[in-house]
Image (cartoon, rainbow, N blue to C red):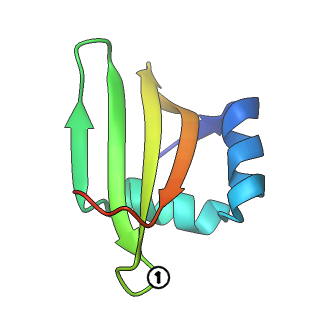
Amino acid sequence: MDYELTRHAKERMAERHISEKLLENVILYPSKVLYDEKNKIMFKKLYAGDKRLLIIIAERIKNKLKIITVIDTSKIKL
């Protein structure tokens, strides 16, 4: 899937040591996907031996995903 990262998303990935490979894995193989009425998409996936949860918030613009932010947490709730 084609995507672009916002400056905010790039900053959060750098802060949290999240690679683009992991980001792509979450988008392609999420554990859960949620949609809202404003065209936002939330991808969730467990990683690091199911001890961490990566959440990606994106917006679909035409045929491209605009990655808004990336959240990494140990507070796991799918």
Q: Residue at x 55, y 67 (%)?
A: 22
Q: Nearer the viewer, residue 12 or 67?
A: 12
Rendered position, 1 above or below 21: above
Residue 63 in view (yes/no): no
Q: Residue at x 52, y 58 (%)?
A: 72
Q: Around disc 1, counting alpha carbons within 10 Å, would you say few (fewer than 14), some (14 to 19), or many (20 or more)? A: few
User: Percent from the top left, x then y, of residue 62?
Assistant: 44, 19
- Residue under label 1: 48
| Left or right of 17, for residue 56 | left
Rendered position, 36 above or below 19: above
Q: Residue at x 46, y 45 (%)?
A: 56
| Left or right of 39, for residue 74 | right
Instruction: Label 1, secondary structure: give it.
Output: loop
Q: Which quadrant of the rendered structure holds the C terminus?
A: bottom left
Residue, far bottom: 49
User: Which image quarter: residue 8?
Assistant: top right
| Left or right of 51, for residue 10 | right
Q: Amino acid at mark 1?
A: Ala
